Amino acid sequence: MIKFRHLFLIGIISLLTYACGSDGVAPVDDFDFAAQAVRDNDTLVNFFKSHYYDTAEGIVKPLEDGQTALFDDPKLVSQDVEETINDVDIDYKLYSYTIEQGTSSKDFPTVVDSVLVNYSGRRILNGSTLNDTDFDSNNNLWFVLGAGVIRGWTYGIPNIKCGINVTLPNEPLTFTGTGKIILFIPSGLAYRNAGRGTILPNESLLFYVELNDIVENTDSDLDGVANILEDIDGDGKPWNDDTDENGIVNFADNDDDGDGVLTRNEDANKDGDPSNDFSDPENPTLPDYLNPNIRVSNE
Ligand SMILES: [Ca+2]
Ligand SMILES: [Ca+2]
Ligand SMILES: [Ca+2]
Ligand SMILES: [Ca+2]
């Protein structure tokens, strides 16, 4: 009986922890994210100096004699990512190691395309060791980058192309020539100071990601304008554009100007693309679907 009660309590505790970080965004306003970004980078650099990529096993391991530390391995690359948290711009370094580039003729995914991935994630403990178990792993799951995934994925996965679907009829999904990458993600581009599940606050993460397939020019709200083209201010971040300020970003909003006419019907020339229709002589460069003064539906 005591054992059962223990299990019950543990269940409640992990549920609570999970709920706190449910959207991956920290609930604390006065946390110094810029200082944490510096600590995160120190953590990752220490990790790179004490680990290497084992080509034969296809995994990252503690450094051994005669091996090249990730820190000195030219395949490890960094990219600068700027995130706005509580109206403050924070600079992060996201690191990745491309194991194999994908061979698909499809383009690289954008930061808001749908991707089909296999993945597994590990916590980086104290900047020097990798936890010995995955906190999560899955095969063949679809995600929209830039919507409901950590920013480390949003910016990291577009470094690789997908593979080719060679699934036979009535057989499990199978891909060949997939892209394979390892992402080393500072906590600020993961679950920040909230943590999630078994991931502690301010913990940096390692993900192995295999990109099976993507949907090019993903159009999540089916309004005829691809997610990546709903980046109205052109800053590369479609998740900060909300023309009608209704709290739903444009790439998830099927009436972008909030005038009651669906974007896909604000297509005066009926070519399936609402972004090339300009009916307002007062505002000749603003497409109708972003112009609340034009309410003509071609439905
Ligand atoms: Ca759209
Ligand atoms: Ca934007
Ligand atoms: Ca839209
Ligand atoms: Ca509209």
Image (cartoon, rainbow, N blue to C red):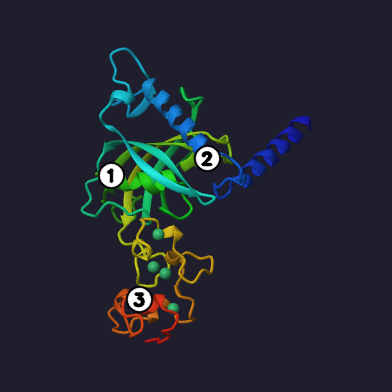
The C terminus: image quadrant: bottom left
Residue at the (38%, 81%) spot, across then down: 266
The part of the image, by quadrant, that contains residue 60 is top left
The extreme front residue here reads 282
Q: Quick check: 34 above or below 104? A: above
User: Front-most of 189 and 235?
Assistant: 235
The part of the image, by quadrant, that contains residue 179 is top left
Residue at the (24%, 44%) spot, across then down: 177
The N terminus: image quadrant: top right
Q: Is residue 4 left or right of residue 133?
A: right
Mark 2 or mark 1: name the one nearer the start of the chain.
Answer: 2
The extreme top residue here reads 65
Q: Is residue 177 left or right of residue 95?
A: left
Gap between marks 3 and 2, in whole Å? 37 Å
Type of amino acid under label 2: Phe
The residue beneath circle 1 is 178
Q: Quick check: 163 above or below 125? A: below
Image quarter where ligand 1 lies: bottom left
The extreme right residue here reads 1
Q: Quick check: 236 above or below 28? A: below
Determine whether the residue tagged by mark 3 lies in a helix, strand or loop. Answer: loop
Relative image position of residue 7 (x, y in whole percent): 70, 35
Q: Are marks 3 and 2 in contact (CB under 8 Å)?
A: no
Count neighbours of disc 3 (C-alpha within 10 A) and say few if under 14, some if 14 to 19, many if 20 or more. Answer: some
The residue beneath circle 3 is 286
User: Front-most of 177 and 195?
Assistant: 195
Relative image position of residue 148 (x, y in whole percent): 48, 53
